[in-house]
Image (cartoon, helix red, strand yellow):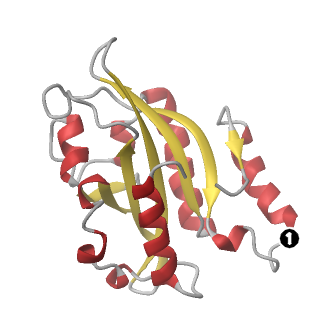
């Protein structure tokens, strides 16, 4: 992880989950992550449906020039990346691992911005994979944020995060299976620790 706010969110999530695969949604206290709230989001993921924004931080909404609550998460991604993003979210839900990815957007040909996206699983009412906590943090805050809406995001390099996929009880074959599932859809996949 390159951005300190991504690391802060990951450390908080990791501390709240303890020995579980994912913390309960109710275990997350927004006051404990107030530095990153503007760059954070919560997704609702129902079986067979596209993930939806339940909550989207003010900087994320300002980036796209609208309130995102209730909108589809794949709607902020370019059409050619929407399926890949949907598969990544499904992977987070099914495997209970986190995903860290680079992203890029622009407001025009000259106004570009790189982001770091983190998506982490949460349990909701005892069921894993129905909620996700995430962040979309600008590597450098664009001066045009809130002035011009950004175009849809382009997906960059993807990495898996979470101690469970690297722990001794899980074999290397399991981690390879995760990589192989996505190999045909993503240009670059790095299963190593960030």
- Residue located 23% across and 36% down the image: 64
Q: In the image shown, does 143 or 41 lie closer to the viewer?
A: 143
Find residue 35 and report its horizontal and vertical position in percent.
27, 62
> Dot 1, how many residues are within 10 Å of its Cα: few (below 14), some (14-19), or many (20+)?
few
Quick one: quadrant of the C terminus?
bottom right
| Residue at image coords 46%, 45% | 116
Q: In this view, does 30 lie above or below 137?
A: below
Q: In the image, residue 84 lies at what x, y percent?
A: 55, 40
Q: Residue at x 73, y 56 (%)?
A: 178
Q: In this view, does 97 lie above or below 176?
A: below
Camera-side residue of 50 and 12: 12
Residue 114 as seen in the image, left or right of residue 161? left
Mark 1 falls on what kind of element?
A: loop
Q: Is residue 129 visible?
A: no
**x and y percentages locating residue 135 in the rendered image:** 38, 55
Viewer-closest of 74 and 21: 21
Q: In the image, is 72 to the left or to the right of 191?
A: left
Q: Mark 1 points at which residue?
A: 171
Where on the picture, by quarter, is residue 126?
bottom left
Q: Residue at x 59, y 58 (%)?
A: 91
Horizontal and vertical percent for residue 96?
58, 70
């Amino acid at each position: 992880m390159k951005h300190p706010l991504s690391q802060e969110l990951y450390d908080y999530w990791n501390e709240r989950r303890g020995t579980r695969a994912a913390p309960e949604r109710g275990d997350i206290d927004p006051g404990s992550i107030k530095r990153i709230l503007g760059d954070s989001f919560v997704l609702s993921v129902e079986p067979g449906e596209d993930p939806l924004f339940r909550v989207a931080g003010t900087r994320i909404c300002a980036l796209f020039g609208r309130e995102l609550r209730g909108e589809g998460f794949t709607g902020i991604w370019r059409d050619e990346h929407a399926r890949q993003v949907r598969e990544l979210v499904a992977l987070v839900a099914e495997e209970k691992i986190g995903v860290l990815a680079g992203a890029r957007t622009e407001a025009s040909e000259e106004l570009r911005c790189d982001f770091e996206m983190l998506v982490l699983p949460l349990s909701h009412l005892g069921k894993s994979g129905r909620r996700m906590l995430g962040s979309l943090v600008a590597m450098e805050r664009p001066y045009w944020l809130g002035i011009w809406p950004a175009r849809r995001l382009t997906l960059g390099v993807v990495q898996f995060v979470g101690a469970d996929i690297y722990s001794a009880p899980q074999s290397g074959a399991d981690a390879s299976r995760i990589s192989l599932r996505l190999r045909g859809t993503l240009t670059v996949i790095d299963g190593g620790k960030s």
